[in-house]
Amino acid sequence: MYANDTVIYTSAKDAATQEAQLNIDLQIYSKWLLDNPLTLNENKCKFFLFGSAQKLKTFLKFSLRINDSPLERTDSFKYLGVTISQSMTWHDHISTITKKVNQRLGVLLRVKHMLRLQACLTLCNSLVLPLFDYGDIVWGDKNNSTLMENLHTLQNKAAKIILDHHPLSSATEALDSLGWKPLRLRRRFHRCATIFKCLHGFIDFNFHFVGNSSIHNYNTRSRDDFHLPLVRTNWGK
C-alpha cells in the first residue's frame, strides 16, 4: 500500500526551530507508516520552503531527513493541481496554464473545420475554461497584473478561434458573442461565491472572518463590513 500526496507543514520564525520541528514530525510519520504496513518511497519525497527572499536567505543550510535518507529541496512543486513556488509569485503556475491552453487551442484549430460552432464552444467550455478557473481564488489577482493580462490574452485568442475571427479583431465583441465574461470578472465571481458559501455553512472551513463591529462601536458606514487585516507588503495582500 502507498500513501500519496501527503503533506507535512509548519511555520517558524527561525531556521533552527523549523528544521528541528520538521525532522521530529518526519520521524513520527515514518514510525506511523511502519506500524500501519504502508510503504514510503524516500526518492519521491521532497521538501519546500516559501517566504520572502530575505527570510529564505537564512534557510540556505536547511536539511531534512527521513529513515536516514536526506530529502531533496525544490523551489516549486505541484500540489492538488496548483504549482506553488517558494516566492509565491505564481509565475510557474501561469506558465503551466499557458502551455496547456495553447496545446488544446492548437488541437481545436486543427479540427474546428469539421465542427459546428456549438461543438467548438462545448470543447472550449469543457477543456479550456476550467484551466483558467481551477484554483483561481488562490492564485488569481495576487498583485500579478502582467500574468493576469497574459491569461486574458489567451481567453481572447480562444474566443476568436471559436468564432473564426481575425486575430486583430475586437476581443470584446468576440467574448460578448459567446457570452463569456472576462477572466477578471470570473475570478471575482468565484471569490464572492466562496465567501458566500463559507458564511452560510456550505464549506467546512473557517476563515475566521471578523466584522468592523467587533473592533469598534462607532456608528460608521462600514460598521457592518468585514475587518480586513493590515499587511505591510504586496506579497501578503
Image (cartoon, rainbow, N blue to C red):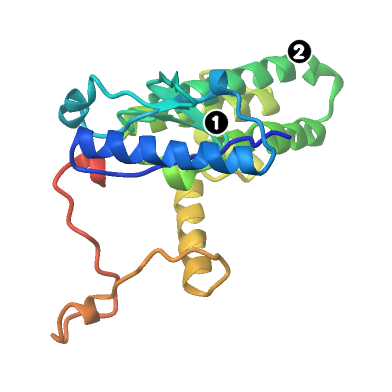
What is the distance, in whole Å, between disc 1 and disc 2 at their CAs?
18 Å
Report the side of 223 relative to 209 (left or right).
left
Residue 158 rendering spot, x and y as whole percentages: 61, 27
Q: Quadrant of residue 109?
A: top right
- The crowd level at tag 1 (other Cα within 10 Å; few <14, some 14-19, many 20+) is many
Q: Which numbered circle lies on residue 13?
A: none
Residue shown at the point (33%, 30%) measured from the top left: 49
Residue 217 sits above or below residue 109 on the image = below
Residue occupied by mark 1: 155
Look at the numbered disc 2 and give the secondary structure of its residue.
Answer: helix
Report the side of 201 relative to 129 (left or right).
left
From this viewpoint, is residue 22 visible? yes
Please state which of residues 193 and 19 is positioned toward the viewer in this rendering: 19
Look at the numbered disc 1 and give the secondary structure of its residue.
Answer: helix
Residue 1 rendering spot, x and y as whole percentages: 74, 35
- The amino acid type, in three-letter code, at marker 2 is Arg
Residue shown at the point (50%, 60%) measured from the top left: 194
Please state which of residues 237 and 149 is positioned toward the viewer in this rendering: 237
- The amino acid type, in three-letter code, at marker 1 is Gln
Residue 39 rendering spot, x and y as whole percentages: 66, 31
Please state which of residues 134 and 23 is positioned toward the viewer in this rendering: 23
- The crowd level at tag 2 (other Cα within 10 Å; few <14, some 14-19, many 20+) is few
From this viewpoint, is residue 140 visible? no
Residue shown at the point (36%, 67%) measured from the top left: 208
Q: Which numbered circle lies on residue 110?
A: 2
Residue 120 rendering spot, x and y as whole percentages: 76, 30
